[in-house]
Amino acid sequence: MSASLSQDVLLVVYSYHHGNTAKIARAMAEVLGAAVAEPSEVTPDDVQKARLIGLGSGIYSATHHESIHRLAAELHPASGRDAFIFSTFGAPGIAASPAFVLNNHSKLREILQSKGYRIVGEFGCAGFNTNSFLHWFGGLNKGRPNDDDLERAREFARTLKQKLHDG
Ligand SMILES: Cc1cc2nc3c(=O)[nH]c(=O)nc-3n(C[C@H](O)[C@H](O)[C@H](O)COP(=O)(O)O)c2cc1C
């Protein structure tokens, strides 16, 4: 991986429930050689320097965390630069179609597109969920993200990396 690529990719993640989305971010970052930060650690100027950005969090009430939305809303106009979106969700796997993932990403996608970002990929996977009453039943999606999920995240990142090189 070139030094410039490693400085060109920034992942911003908010992951407070069980650190599920942070695990996904780290797996992607390994492949992309990306920096990983929380929303409070980056400014719009930092984000503007990156050639590719990835924004992600757990899904809370069917959307990303407000700190991710807020950061996206503060970004400078991007004029066609590349962004990807990722998340982990707590719904049981059976309920989680690709459309479910895209639906959870709608608000963040709209904000990024309104800033002029081109969305080059979206990734979602199950994450351990003990929200509310689920806590009393041992939670949903125990052990997720698992090794397979992390490998899918790496594979997603490899595809993005290829696009960057071709790009
Ligand atoms: C307050 C709260 C609300 C949640 N709302 C949803 C939801 O609407 N849909 C869903 O699929 N999962 C929901 N979840 C489950 C989380 O999306 C899931 O556990 C996720 O992996 C958490 O990511 P994190 O550990 O990175 O914070 C919710 C969890 C919490 C704590």
Image (spheres, rainbow, N blue to C red):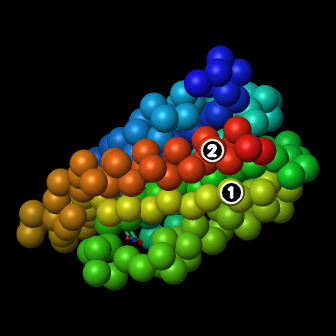
- Disc with the residue nearer the chain's start (1 vs 2): 1
Compared with residue 131, is residue 45 higher up or lower down, i.e. above or below? above
| Total numbered circles | 2
Pointer 1 with pointer 2, Cβ within 8 A: no
Which secondary structure, mark 2? helix
Q: Nearer the viewer, residue 118 or 41?
A: 118
Which secondary structure, mark 1? strand
Instruction: Specify the amino acid type for callout 1.
Output: Val
Quarter residue 125 falls in: bottom left
Percent x, y for residue 62?
A: 48, 72
| Crowding near the residue tagged with mark 1, few <14, some 14–19, many ≥20 C-alpha atoms within 10 Å | some
Percent x, y for residue 164?
A: 70, 42
User: In the picture, which quadrant includes the N terminus?
Assistant: top right
Q: Nearer the viewer, residue 93 or 15?
A: 93
Is residue 136 among the parts visible in the rendering?
A: yes
- At a point 90% along the width and 50% down the height, the residue shown is 79
| Crowding near the residue tagged with mark 2, few <14, some 14–19, many ≥20 C-alpha atoms within 10 Å | few
Is residue 68 among the parts visible in the rendering?
A: no
Percent x, y for residue 26?
A: 42, 36
Residue 8 is left or right of residue 101, and the answer is: right
- At a point 64% along the width and 21% down the height, the residue shown is 2
Give the Cα separation between the discs numbered 1 and 2: 12 Å
- At a point 42% along the width and 79% down the height, the residue shown is 97
Q: Nearer the viewer, residue 11 or 147?
A: 147
Instruction: Specify the amino acid type for callout 2.
Output: Gln
The residue wearing badge 2 is: 162
The residue wearing badge 1 is: 120
Residue at the extreme front: 166
User: In the picture, which quadrant includes the C terminus?
Assistant: top right
Compared with residue 121, is residue 102 higher up or lower down, i.e. above or below? below
Percent x, y for residue 68?
A: 60, 50
